[in-house]
Amino acid sequence: MAPVCGGTADPREAAGPAAQWRPFDLYVELQDLPRAYTCNELWYRFHDLLLAIGARPYPQIVVYHCDSTVAQSSHSPSLQLQFQLPDLLPPSLSRYADVAVERSTIRLGPGKLPSFTTQDCELLKQMNAKLLAALPVHVVGTLQCPAPAASKERFVLEVQALLPHS
């Protein structure tokens, strides 16, 4: 029996499957939201969602058709998003990995994402249709928004994504 020597395995392999950061440059148009959002509100909501699904820190987010006050903001803003997500590599290319990942189920909604409130269900619904649908994530189930009278009711969207292994 051959002796076992330590330290020969790639530490990224021990942490999880091998992946590379894949860049995304997307334009998202939101339509007829039930309420207007300030530029900062939209920036933080998209930032929090991107980080929750495994995006590399410091995504570039530019928001259009909004202002610093809700009264001057539009119900149909747009965003330009530039960010990176992990993308699995086949085992034969694992030597090119720059991140180890693990597949996780993430719950998105108020109380799960720092900037989201119970009034953001329609926003999350449009984020799902216009952003998450364009990404290599798997949405589990469908998002149902509670009736406006039940606005304190929690909503949640579950997504399976590759998260960088910490």
Image (cartoon, rainbow, N blue to C red):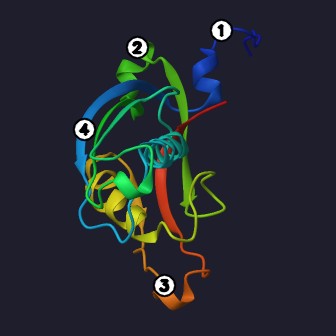
Residue at image position (45%, 41%) is 43
Residue that mark 2 sits on: 96
- Quadrant in which the C terminus appears: top right
Q: Which mark is residue 101?
A: none
Residue 8 numbered tag: 1
Q: Nearer the viewer, residue 124 or 16?
A: 124
Residue 129 placed where, x, y %?
Answer: 28, 61
Q: Nearer the viewer, mark 4 or mark 2?
A: 4
Identify the residue position indicated by label 4 in the image.
Answer: 26
Q: Position of residue 29 (x, y in %)?
A: 22, 52
User: Which secondary structure, mark 2?
Assistant: helix
- The residue to which callout 3 is attached is 146
Of the image marks 2 and 1, the number of the one nearer the N terminus? 1
Identity, as a three-letter code, of the amino acid under mark 3: Pro
Kind of residue sitting beneath label 4: Leu
Q: Of helix, strand and loop, which one carries label 3?
A: loop
Q: Nearer the viewer, mark 2 or mark 1?
A: 2
